[in-house]
């Protein structure tokens, strides 16, 4: 796959890992990048004076906005499903169901809705097309700090793997990304070691270019977790993120 001249769409593009993906795609020579966000007015400061970045309203919790975005952006060849919500708290807390519901609507239902809306465009761009889902190592372990997030990311991982199977016969590769904690506003309250989102985005795009199959662990923390999990699952599961 060649990213030069490609038309990409990145959800949650105005900050954090989404912003890093847009920045790295620009560096790789992408021809157009739809920066999909809930509030397009936030993009002016994020990518000032960059004509290749096209503002696009898309709220993963709003099915109407997803349909409208897909009707507008019909030339997408690379979809990066990055938008997510992250809240802490115990599942049995008073607001546990509300937190889980919000996480489910964005992290699972929203991810699938965006994918369904843009797969026709991706299929038209084959063989230079790909689908990238940003999951998390939390999908593999219900970390104590973020159990609702972990549960929905586990569902998103399963969804990604099912889509990979469904789309394989149509020649559309599906990449599943499982990073560790990142240096982003969304995860600022977490007290653990965090990776640079720009380095993570660079590693993911490198894996896409190489056509690597399976799950992508794009940072040192994620790779260390996976190594520990595969070597000794019993001592790796049901633990809090490693403290600084």
Image (tube, grey):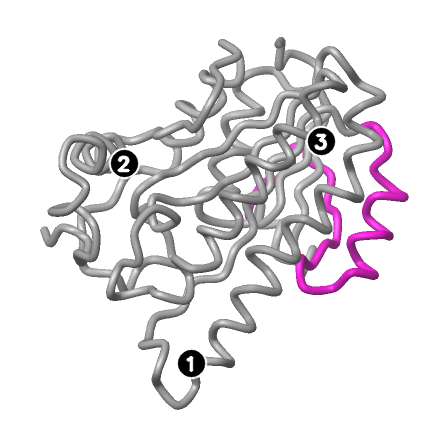
Residue 206 appears left or right of 236: right
Quadrant of the rendered image containing residue 200: top left
Mark drawn on residue 167: none
Are discs 1 and 2 less than 8 Å apart at CB? no
1 vs 2, front mark = 1
Residue 190 belongs to magenta span: no
Name the residue beneath numbered marker 3: 51
Horizontal and vertical percent position of residue 73: 83, 37
3 vs 2, front mark = 2
Are discs 1 and 3 less than 8 Å apart at CB? no
Is 223 situated above or below 42? Answer: above
C-alpha span from label 3 to label 2: 34 Å
Which is nearer the eye, 48 or 179?
A: 179
Horizontal and vertical percent position of residue 235: 11, 47
Q: What crowding class fits label 3: few (fewer than 14 Cα within 10 Å), some (14-19), or many (20 or more)? A: few
C-alpha span from label 1 to label 3: 43 Å
Residue 34 appears left or right of 228: right
Quadrant of the rendered image containing residue 163: top right
Mark drawn on residue 222: 2
Q: Residue at x 35, y 85 (%)?
A: 93
Q: Residue at x 53, y 48 (%)?
A: 156
Horizontal and vertical percent position of residue 107: 55, 56
* Residue at disc 2, secondary structure: helix
* Residue at disc 3, secondary structure: loop
Q: What crowding class fits label 1: few (fewer than 14 Cα within 10 Å), some (14-19), or many (20 or more)? A: some
* Residue at disc 1, secondary structure: helix
Which is nearer the eye, 159 or 173?
A: 159
Q: Which residues are magenta?
A: 46-75
Residue 49 belongs to magenta span: yes
Q: What crowding class fits label 2: few (fewer than 14 Cα within 10 Å), some (14-19), or many (20 or more)? A: many
Q: How many marks?
A: 3
Mark drawn on residue 96: 1
């Amino acid at each position: 796959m060649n990213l030069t001249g490609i038309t990409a769409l990145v959800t949650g593009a105005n900050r954090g890992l989404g912003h890093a993906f847009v920045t790295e795609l620009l560096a790789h020579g992408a021809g157009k990048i739809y920066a999909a966000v809930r509030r397009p007015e936030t993009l002016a400061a994020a990518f000032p004076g960059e004509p290749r970045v096209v503002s696009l309203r898309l709220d993963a919790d709003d099915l109407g906005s997803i349909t409208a975005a897909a009707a507008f952006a019909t030339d997408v060849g690379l979809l990066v499903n990055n938008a997510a919500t992250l809240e802490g708290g115990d599942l049995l807390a008073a607001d546990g169901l509300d937190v889980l519901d919000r996480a489910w609507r964005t992290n699972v239902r929203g991810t699938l809705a965006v994918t369904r809306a843009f797969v026709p465009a991706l299929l038209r761009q084959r063989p230079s097309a790909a689908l990238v889902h940003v999951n998390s190592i939390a999908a593999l372990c219900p970390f104590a700090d973020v159990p609702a997030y972990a549960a929905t990311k586990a569902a998103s991982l399963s969804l990604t793997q099912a889509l990979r199977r469904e789309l394989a016969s149509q020649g559309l590769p599906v990449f599943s990304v499982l990073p560790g904690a990142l240096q982003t506003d969304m995860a600022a309250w977490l007290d653990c070691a965090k990776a640079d989102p720009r380095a993570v985005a660079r590693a993911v795009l490198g894996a896409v270019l190489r056509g690597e199959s399976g799950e992508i662990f794009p940072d040192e923390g994620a790779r260390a977790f996976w190594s520990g999990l595969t070597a000794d699952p019993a001592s790796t599961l049901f633990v809090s993120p490693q403290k600084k």
